[in-house]
């Protein structure tokens, strides 16, 4: 975060974490900046891999060494914190890191990547401090430099056809309005000095007619400018929002896992704030510049001495605004983060309302939301107090300056240097100059404040998307330019729909691989089941196959396409998937089966529903396939949801099915019937399952443990007269 620096003292910035598990990295950014390495989160995020489960103290010291900072971890009591070399990093709440900036008597000044800048008493800090601190100092290879990623506005907006021409028209209207505005004080001066003195009725009539014509022209030009501004705002916002949304939905799925829904929503809504500044404040700023320049020129023609007073007042106002800027920016960041947290909590509450109600914890949830709401209101109050104090200072300064100029101008009239009309005209120009220069100064600092929103929006638009869509955000105007893998090319490899060769994978920053060397071939028409204890990596393996995660080593080939191919993500279109956290969407049952496709084949939809054993259930509903269901599948049983999801997977005409606990809510009889139906289709199926009945339907059973797959010997069950269910249960019990 850039701030205006008025002294040569080192400043500790406040860096807020973007992802839920990067508090340690955010603390490292603050410490690096303190020691002279100006960096930011995106830069360090690219350089160091951080586990989605958080950062250990050891990993933090490794990352610090990577940027030339030596570390010393110490264990100490709370009372000994003042003896540390400050600032330093503290371990907090057993799962968090913060930066201790200062110790002031019995109070600590903390820079918390999650909550912002907070001041705590030693007693309150004792509830959070774990007794571990990390001091960081420059090592011999440390070099002070600036490696921050500069965020340019063009990177955020991309190309917007017609933007410059529309802005040019608005500027032309604004210039015409300004020319007409300049004439009003001169006509007023003419009325006072000529008409009233000479009692010239005919001249008064001409001036009044001129004023009326000017007013009418100003009104028409103002209407034209406002309509052009509205049109520009709507068109620009629509194009830009559409591009940002297109980019958002193509981001890697791991990006969504690392952020809350509330923060993602707040980042997306930053588009509106920035767009308002671009289409309104920029144009108004250009108009203010014209007003300032022209009014200043006219004032100089009247009295350079009085104009100097107005200019000095404008400079004082700019300095006053600059002094307030760091506090106002910090309060804006606090308000944004508090709003995002409250929004995230609200959305999470709605998603889990059933669990809250049946467990009777709504009161606790309500209290938590109320605390977040109060925190947001407090940030707004702090922001309002700052603005109130600033407005009082601004108003007082303006009143004093106006009084001085009026006193000076009246003296000029008494001395005979000014006429009364000249004084009235000068005061009119001075009022316009003061209001325009104040407005221009406010817009300049408001533009600087946009960095709060630019940084949030940049987290969306500057994050690379999947596959060949990894190109600058500004080029995402038309998805049809993205090359694709043809179905013919993929069909050539139908004899080997899925091959995994020695796959090794660990989450970024993780020490032990979750998948330690898995090899697997799914043959045509084969049903393969993978089982294992919860948390052993089965779902991770599914995400690797789908290209959601990228393996550290080894190769994945689906329909002949290697996982390293930039178009690998398109193989998902040929894989029928039912995952544990699959969703139904708001719409009809038919919409959810065909997945809102424009190419609606109702005959195939009904056929797939029958294969998934959901047709009879749907037809028993009042309006059949047009029955509306909610976002969470309200009104449907767990088994019905799973069968609709299975029908959706079959509707895609997949090359093979990938089912992760896809029948866990079905009764045994229905599960057996579905398994038999899938066998008759001849589709290769890869099952992830725990239930012995599901596993028993497979041709091969693979057991995943310690990152490796072991094939279970089904012949053992034949030789010993043991069922597959009994054998699988025995293996899982032993492991």
Image (cartoon, rainbow, N blue to C red):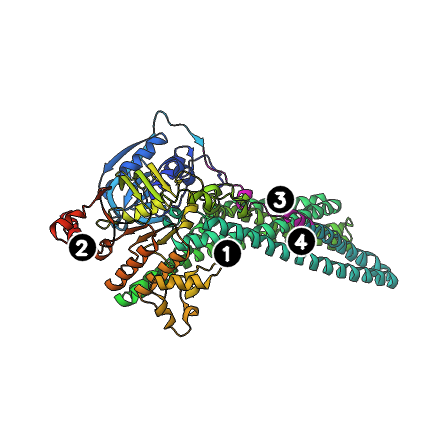
Asked if the residues shown at circle 3 and circle 4 are in contact, with their CB atoms under 8 angstroms apart, the answer is no
Determine which of the numbered discs, if any, sits on residue 431 in the image: 4
Give above or below for 292 relative to 192.
Answer: above
Residue 320 visible within the image: no
What residue is pinned by disc 1? 388
Badge 2, how many Cα within 10 Å: few under 14, some, many 20+? some
Under circle 3, the secondary element is helix
- The magenta span reads 147-168
Of the two numbered discs 3 and 2 in the rendering, the one whose residue sits closer to the viewer: 2
Q: Earlier along the polypeptide chain: callout 4 or callout 2?
A: 4
Judging depth in this view, the residue of 525 and 118 nearest the camera is 525
Of the two numbered discs 3 and 4 in the rendering, the one whose residue sits closer to the viewer: 4
For this view, does 707 lie left or right of residue 336? left
Badge 3, how many Cα within 10 Å: few under 14, some, many 20+? few
Determine which of the numbered discs, if any, sits on residue 725 in the image: 2
What residue is pinned by disc 3? 312
Q: Position of residue 49 (x, y in %)?
A: 35, 38
Q: Residue furthest top?
A: 140
Q: Any magenta on residue 717? A: no
């Amino acid at each position: 975060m850039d701030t205006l620096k008025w002294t040569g003292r080192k400043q500790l910035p406040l860096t807020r974490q973007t992802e839920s598990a990067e508090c340690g990295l955010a603390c490292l950014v603050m410490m690096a900046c303190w020691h002279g390495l100006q960096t930011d989160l995106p830069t360090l995020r690219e350089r160091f891999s951080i586990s989605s489960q958080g950062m250990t103290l050891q990993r933090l010291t490794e990352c610090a060494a990577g940027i030339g900072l030596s570390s010393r971890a110490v264990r100490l009591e709370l009372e000994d914190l003042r003896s540390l070399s400050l600032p330093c990093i503290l371990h907090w709440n057993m799962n968090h890191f913060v930066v201790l900036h200062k110790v002031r008597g019995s109070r600590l000044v903390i820079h918390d990547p999650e909550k912002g800048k907070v001041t705590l008493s030693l007693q309150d800090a004792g509830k959070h401090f774990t007794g571990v601190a990390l001091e960081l100092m420059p090592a011999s290879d440390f070099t002070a430099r600036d490696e921050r990623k500069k965020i340019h506005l063009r990177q955020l907006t991309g190309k917007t056809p017609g933007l410059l021409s529309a802005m040019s028209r608005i500027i032309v209207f604004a210039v015409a309005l300004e020319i007409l505005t300049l004439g009003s004080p001169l006509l007023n001066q003419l009325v006072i000095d000529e008409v009233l003195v000479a009692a010239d009725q005919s001249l008064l009539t001409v001036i009044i007619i001129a004023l009326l014509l000017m007013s009418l022209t100003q009104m028409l030009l103002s209407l034209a400018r406002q309509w052009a501004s509205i049109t520009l705002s709507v068109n620009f916002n629509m194009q830009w929002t559409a591009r940002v949304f297109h980019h958002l939905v193509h981001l890697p799925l791991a990006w969504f896992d690392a952020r809350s829904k509330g923060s993602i929503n707040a980042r997306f809504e930053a588009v509106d704030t920035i767009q308002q500044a671009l289409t309104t404040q920029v144009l108004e700023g250009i108009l203010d510049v014209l007003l300032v320049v022209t009014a200043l020129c006219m004032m100089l023609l009247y009295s350079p001495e009085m104009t100097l007073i107005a200019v000095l007042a404008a400079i004082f106002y700019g300095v006053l605004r600059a002094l307030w800027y760091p506090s106002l920016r910090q309060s804006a960041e606090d308000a944004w983060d508090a709003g995002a947290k409250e929004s995230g909590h609200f959305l999470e509450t709605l998603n889990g309302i059933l669990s809250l109600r049946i467990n009777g914890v709504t009161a606790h949830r309500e209290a938590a939301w109320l605390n977040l709401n109060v925190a947001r209101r407090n940030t707004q109050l702090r922001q309002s107090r700052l603005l109130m104090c600033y407005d009082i200072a601004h108003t007082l300064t303006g009143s004093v300056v106006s009084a001085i100029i009026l006193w000076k101008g009246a003296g000029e009239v008494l001395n005979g240097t000014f006429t009364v009309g000249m004084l009235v005209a000068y005061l009119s120009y001075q009022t316009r100059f003061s209001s325009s220069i104040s407005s221009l100064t406010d817009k300049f600092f408001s533009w600087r404040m946009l960095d709060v929103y630019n940084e949030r929006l940049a987290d969306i638009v500057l994050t690379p998307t999947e596959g060949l869509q990894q190109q600058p955000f500004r080029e995402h105007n038309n998805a049809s330019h993205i090359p694709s893998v043809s179905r013919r090319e993929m069909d050539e490899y139908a004899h080997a729909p899925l091959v995994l060769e020695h796959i090794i994978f660990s989450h970024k920053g993780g020490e032990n691989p979750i998948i330690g060397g898995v090899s697997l071939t799914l043959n045509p028409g084969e049903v393969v089941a993978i089982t294992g204890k919860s948390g052993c990596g089965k779902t991770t393996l599914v995400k690797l196959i789908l290209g959601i995660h990228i393996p550290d080593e080894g190769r994945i080939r689906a329909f002949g396409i290697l996982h390293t191919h930039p178009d690998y993500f398109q193989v998902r279109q040929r894989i029928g998937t039912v995952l544990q956290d699959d969703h139904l969407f708001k719409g009809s049952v038919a919409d959810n089966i065909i997945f809102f496709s424009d190419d609606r084949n109702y005959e195939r939809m009904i056929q797939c529903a029958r294969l998934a054993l959901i047709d009879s259930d749907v037809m028993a509903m009042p309006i059949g396939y047009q029955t509306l269901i909610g976002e969470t599948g309200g009104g449907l049983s767990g088994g019905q949801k799973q069968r609709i999801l299975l029908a959706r997977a079959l509707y895609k005409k997949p090359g093979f099915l990938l089912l992760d606990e896809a029948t866990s809510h079905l009764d045994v009889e229905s599960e057996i019937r579905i398994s038999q139906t899938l066998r008759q289709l001849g589709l290769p199926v890869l099952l992830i399952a725990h239930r012995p009945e599901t596993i028993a339907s497979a041709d091969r059973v693979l057991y995943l443990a310690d990152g490796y797959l072991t094939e279970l010997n089904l012949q053992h069950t034949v030789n010993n007269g043991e069922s597959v269910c009994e054998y699988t249960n025995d293996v899982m019990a032993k492991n």
